[in-house]
Amino acid sequence: MRLLKKIIHRDVKNLDGNTFERIAARGIVLKGSKILLMYTKLYNDYSFPGGGVDVDEDLVTGLKRELAEETGAKNVEVISEFGYIDEYRPHHKPEYDLIHMLSYFYVCKIDEHLEEPSFEDYEIANGMSADWIDIHEAIQHNKMVIANKEPSMGLSIERETFALEKIVEELLEGKMKQK
């Protein structure tokens, strides 16, 4: 899969130290210019559905599980690989200095109707919800949060916003150019 971007968070001074490795799979589900995203009230941001892949899972199996859990998606079909983002950022757990996150993005199709999600306790506490939103609105919203340096801003917002912009450039504008 192609590398979309390597991100080293501004608070990371070097890549030495005790590093937690995390592999995540994230779904790109489009319906015209609308995209299925997760809104998190605590961070006031939009992010991709998906998350950490379990040790015994491959990326696609983990992606399908995460999409079902977070959005209630049924019959998830992976259409194509989109790319991955290689990211280093500070870790909130004291036993680690850094988290090295590899986020793999896949273009997917799902059934029209979403079932009830099955959120984990922390997702409920953070106020997560699945939302069909115009992709341009989601980008504008996230950019406003970044520009305002909102105190609640999460560490993943820059990764998520970059990926959203890349999707517009390659999947939406690319389709327009082909017509």
Image (spheres, helix red, strand yellow):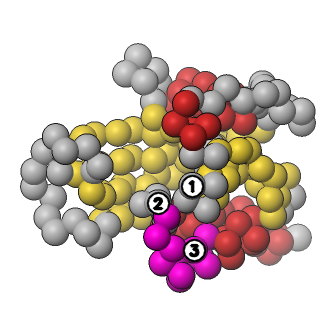
Answer left or right for 34 relative to 50. right
Answer left or right for 5 relative to 64. left
Answer left or right for 50 relative to 73. left
Residue 77 visible somewhere in the drawing:
no
Check disc 3 and give the amino acid type: Val
Q: Residues within 10 Å of mark 1 (few under 14, many from 20)?
A: some
| Callout 3: SS | helix
Mark closer to the chain start, 3 or 2: 3
Mark closer to the chain start, 2 or 1: 1
Q: How far apart, in angstroms, are the residues tagged by discs 2 and 1? A: 9 Å
Check disc 2 and give the amino acid type: Gly
Q: Position of residue 133 (x, y in %)?
A: 80, 59
Mark closer to the chain start, 1 or 3: 1
Residue 81 belongs to magenta span: no
In front: label 1 or label 3: 1
In front: label 2 or label 1: 1
Give the residues in magenta.
Answer: 142-152
Identify which residue, 38 or 21, lies in the foreground.
38
Residue that mark 1 sits on: 42
Residue at the image position 77 percent from the left and 38 percent from the top: 109
Q: How far apart, in angstroms, are the residues tagged by discs 1 and 3? A: 12 Å
Indicate which disc residue 154 carries: 2
Q: Residues within 10 Å of mark 2 (few under 14, many from 20)?
A: some
Residue at the image position 55 percent from the left and 30 percent from the top: 121
- Quadrant in which the C terminus is drawn: bottom right
